[in-house]
Image: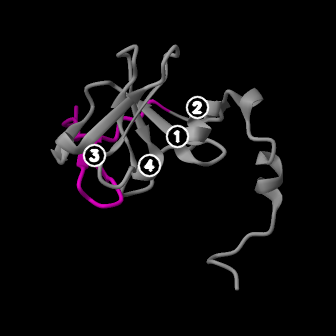
Amino acid sequence: MGEKQPMKKITGSCLCDTVRFECDDSIESFHLCHCTQCQKVTGSSHASNLFTAVNNIQWLKGSASIKRYNVPGRNISNAFCGECGSALPYASLSGKALVIPAGCLDITPNIQPSSQIFYAERAPWFESAMVCKKYDSMPD
């Protein structure tokens, strides 16, 4: 039998590069979450979240700058850089998964979204946004 290949590492960071992390590329699932809390946290129609084992992270720098907010009365949380506000990985409140915002990764993950969750709560303009005119940069 061949030797087991080491797990590929993927890295991520916040916008200002105060916080950096790495994890194994053992992502279990990728969901687009349309819940109203994710809309508020992202300022967009949905959050793009990867899920992996809760201990699958190593903070390379800036962990003291990470802030966490737990939504009162809900089993929902998020983490972000205290300097620039970028979304960052966090352990779910249940402690069963590490949630990694896909946009904080330095590379494109080797997984595609598998579902859109809390779709009933989606932004009323979500479908029209998917078919509107597209530009490769800011239009004139």
Q: Regarding mark 4 in the picture, which secondary structure is present there?
A: loop
Q: As shown in the figure, which amino acid type bears the numbered disc 1?
A: Val
Q: Residues within 10 Å of mark 1 (few under 14, many from 20)?
A: some
- Image quadrant holding the C terminus, namely bottom right
The answer to which of marks 1 and 4 sits earlier in the sequence is 1
Instruction: Confirm or deny contact between disc 1 and disc 4 (CB under 8 A).
Output: no
Q: Residues within 10 Å of mark 2 (few under 14, many from 20)?
A: some
Picture coordinates of residue 75 (x, y %)? 49, 16
Q: As shown in the figure, which amino acid type bears the numbered disc 3?
A: Lys
135 vs 9, nearest the viewer? 135
Q: Is residue 104 above or below residue 1?
A: below
> Which residue, given by chain and number where applicable, does mark 1 sit on?
41
> Which residue, given by chain and number where applicable, does mark 3 sit on?
8
Q: Residues within 10 Å of mark 3 (few under 14, many from 20)?
A: few
Q: From the viewer's perspective, is the residue at label 3 or at label 4 nearer?
A: 4
Picture coordinates of residue 80 (x, y %)? 36, 42
The answer to which of marks 1 and 3 sits earlier in the sequence is 3
Give the CA distance from mark 1 to mark 4: 21 Å
Residue 110 seen in the figure: no
Write down the region rendered in magenta: 1-29
Farthest residue toward the bottom? Answer: 140
Q: Regarding mark 2 in the picture, which secondary structure is present there?
A: helix
Please indicate whether residue 112 sits to the left or right of residue 70 in the image: right
